[in-house]
Image (tube, rainbow, N blue to C red):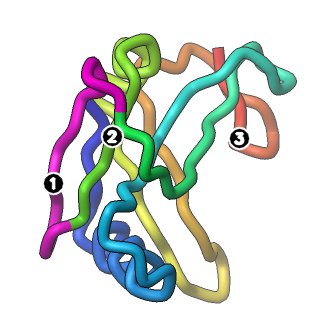
Amino acid sequence: MITLTDSAATKVKVLLEEEAEESLALRVAVRPGGCSGYSYEMFFDGDIADDDISATYGEGVRVVVDPSSAQLLNGATLDYKDGLQQAGFSIDNPNATSTCGCGESFS
């Protein structure tokens, strides 16, 4: 299962509050595609399957991952930075043997 840093959990919480929908969770997934073989997806989802893996971070930020993605995200960390050099979410995935230049796909 992917973990969230405190800054990522805080940012996700703010974004979820803006959605104003209590049933939403952050879904993190891995899909075939991208220039390196797999790409990451993140979106708010209210359709949680029985076999989804779920964890809660920070002050009630629920994260769900489907079983196939969970294998590729085991040990990964989602971070959020808001600075001059780097802004946005990033995933540090120890399972990735290579990544593309944009940082959005891996193999």
Q: Is residue 37 above or below residue 75?
A: above
Disc 2 target residue:
64
Residue at x 24%, y 28% (from the top left corner): 53
Residue at x 45%, y 69% (from the top left corner): 80
Disc 3 target residue:
104
Disc 1 target residue:
56
Check residue 55 for magenta coloring.
yes
Q: Quadrant of residue 51?
A: top left
Q: Nearer the viewer, residue 9 or 65?
A: 65
Q: Is residue 63 above or below residue 88?
A: above
Identify the secondary structure beneath mark 3.
loop
Please name which of the two marks, 1 or 3, marks the residue nearer to the observer: 1
Residue 19: x and y in percent read: 50, 80
Q: Quadrant of residue 83?
A: bottom right
Mark 1: few/some/many CA within 10 Å (<14, 14-19, 20+): some
Q: Callout 1, which amino acid?
A: Thr
Instruction: Give the total number of marks visible in the rendering.
Output: 3
Q: Specify the segment rendered in magenta.
A: 49-60
Q: Callout 2, which amino acid?
A: Val
Q: Callout 3, which amino acid?
A: Glu
Residue at x 24%, y 65% (from the top left corner): 61
Identify the secondary structure beneath mark 1.
strand
Q: Nearer the viewer, residue 96 or 85?
A: 96
Quadrant containing the C terminus is: top right
Check residue 81 for magenta coloring.
no
Q: Are marks 2 and 3 in contact (CB under 8 Å)?
A: no
Quadrant containing the N terminus is: top left
